[in-house]
Structures are given as structure tokens and as C-alpha cells.
Amino acid sequence: MTGRRGLSVRIGALVAVISVIAAATAAGAAPAPTWNEVTSPHVSGNSSEIDAMVTTGTDDLWAFGFDRANIAGTFEWRVLGEHWNGSTWTRLNTLDRETTPAHDFIDGAAATGPNDVWIVGHSDTAPGNQASRNLVEHWDGAHWTIDNTVPDPGVRRELLAASASGPGDIWAVGDATNPEVSDYNAMVLHRSGGTWSQVPFDLTVPGCNAASRGELEAVDAVGPTDVYVAGWCQSQPIGRERGFVAHWDGGSWTLVLRANGAAELKELATYHGEVWVAGNTYFRGEQDATFPLVFHGTAAAGFTQVPVRHSPHFGGPVGALSVGPGGVFIAGQLTATPHGNPTASFALHLLPNGKWRKELVGTNSGGYARLHAAATEPDGTSWLGGLGVGGTNLDPVALLDRRS
């Protein structure tokens, strides 16, 4: 249990960190900025979505996801990659496995520089997602290549996030399952010395189903012996997710955060030695609803929940987290009714006083956005990625919003 003085110290530290991060934004008295859509290439008739973003410098931003196209009467899902040079988004010549039909998805990205970019995801290899392979691609400044040396444990595998602590040191996380045999089992892959290996995730999370090691949805590698992962697992009895954060010290995993109640932790980012975690908390029953959940801290000092105000009947899932010189942001979709479809999008900016400010997310189509990715450039320019839905869009279109 945290004592009153310890809690005061943590809150004081939190306010100090927020003030440092947000100083450049002068958020206290300035009008709330808006997020404006920046046009990106789109193939007419295709559905497209951005699910991962990474920056390698000011005016050097990368966004990835998938394109769905109807090819000769069959739907195919192909890797989508786009690059921002400060003035224009251009399409990248990313690769597909060319199965028949192609079912390739990208969910995570990491980079150490403009000539060292990694993307991770999965390729479905059987109908109904009953079997899949890990998909990893690398950009060396001249060519994209598919890395087929990546381990493929289990039958159904998917990589959901990636992080790079330095050139040649890449981490990727997700889950691997054997359908009808086991629940989600956390998967951690590490590339060092030019070779990929699986890092056993043998951590036991109290309250979780013994047959499950969970699903890892986020990773941030500060260094080869300083790695954070965030995710969730099914509880025992089945029915309530347990969100958690674990830390790797080079030799073993340590549980450093377990969220109370039903929760999933899906986003994680470190900045100036501080760790930020975002996800969702769930309330079961007739008033089933989803609300944002945010934590802040370190493995050594512990974590403190950062309150996010919401109505008992009006919430929504978090889909993106960005921490950097532009501030701390979470973004996602609002739902007005239990089990309802999203009705609008939100971006919340954490102010120096510890309160969140709502900022408008724009879609030029007149619809709304589903937000799945975020990134902040070194100069503080922040971006959100996802897809635009409704309005004049007959099909979902990849969305890239810049804060200004």
C-alpha cells in the first residue's frame, strides 16, 4: 500500500514531468489546437487503414497498415506503407507474401534512422484466421525485404508492436496460439547480432487463466536490458481481462503493473526516463462500457494512475498514445451507448495542471475517424493515424491527421 507521503511524491513528480513535456506548447491559456487531415495517396475503390507510425527525424515520418482490394472478384489485404518528407505523403514499395489471395497486415513499426526501418504484423495462411505466420519487413535505405528468419511458434501468430533500442537491436511482441488447445500466449521476439530469437515470457500474472500468458500489444525497448511490454490476459474464470505491464532486465521478467478490475493495456511509450501506459477499463453488465485508462511511472518507482474524466454512460476505447516534446496525447473513439458503434473521435492532451483537454479530430470526408496510431516528430509536431469512416467515403480511407 502506498503511504500518503509516497503518493504525494508521485503526484508531484507527475505534475513536474507533464510541465516539462508541455512547456513548449504553452497550453495553459492558448486555444485548443485542432487535428487536421493531411491528404495521402489513395487507390480508388480500396479500403485502407493506418495501424502503425514511427518517426526518424523532423519531416521524416513513416505510416503503415493495409490496403484491401477486390482483385478479380477476390478480396486481398496487402501491406500499405507511406512516407512524409515534410510536404507530401508518398506510397512505399512495401512487399507482400503473394499468397492466393494475399492476407498481409502490419500493426507495428520501429526505426533507428531513415535507412533502418522495421515493420511487423502477420500473414493469414488459412481461412478464417485459423493459421497465420509472423510478417517482418526491413527497409535498408534502398530496398524492402521480408525477413523469413523470424521464429513462428504455435499455429496462429501475430506481431502487434515493435521497438528498437539501437541499430541491430529490435524487439517485437504479440501472441501465438494453438486454436482449440490454448488461450492467447504472449510472444516476445528479439533480434540481436543479426539473429532473431524467442524470449520466453514465463511471467505469471495473478488472477490470469493458467493456460494463458496473455497478449502483448505494446513494447518499448529503452536498451537491450531495459524493455517494457504491455498487454492483457484472460482471468480465471474466463470473462474479465487483466491488463498488465512487465519489465525485462536482461535476464528475467518482472510484473511492474497490474490494473484493477477488467482492463486491457494496449499502448506504451517512454520519454525522458518516464513510462506512459494507456488502455481501457471495462464495466460489465447492463451498463457495459469502455473508458480510457492511463498510468505513469517506472519499474523502479512504481506506477500511478492518471485520472481521465468520463460520464458513466459515455466512454470509448483508446487506440493511440503519443508522448514527446509536443506533450502527452491519447486518442480513440467515443461510444454513446453500451456495446454501441463509435459515434465520434477524441484526442485528449494532458495539461501541466494534470487535467486532460479535448481536441477536435478532423476528417475532410465529413465522417469520423477510427484512430489506431500516433507519433511525434522531434520538433513537437504530433500525428494521428487510422481511417476515415462515413461521410463522402464509400469505403474506409487511410487517415493521417497533424496537430496545428
Image: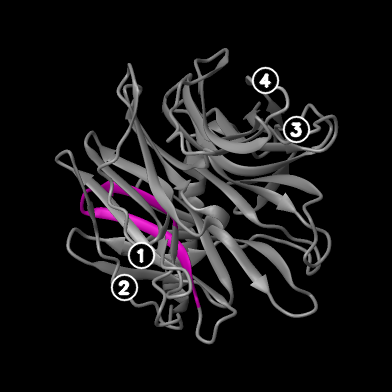
Disc 4 residue type (three-letter)? Thr
Mark earlier in primary sequence (1, 4) = 4
Element type where label 2 sits in the image: loop
For label 4, the SS is: loop
Badge 4 vs badge 2, beta-carbon distance below 8 Å: no
* Residue at the bottom extreme of this rendering: 237
Instruction: Judge left or right: residue 45 versus residue 161.
Output: right
Q: Which residue is mark 2?
A: 203
Query: Mark 3 or mark 2, which has the lower sequence index?
Result: 2
Instruction: Answer whether residue 224 is magenta in the image.
Output: yes
Q: Earlier in the sequence, mark 4 or mark 2?
A: 4
Label for residue 362?
3
Near-viewer residue (130 or 288): 130
Expressed as whole percent of the image width and height from the top left, the position of residue 385 reads 60, 36
The disc, 3 or 1, on the residue closer to the chain's N-terminal end is 1
Q: Residue at (41%, 68%) from the top-left corner?
A: 178
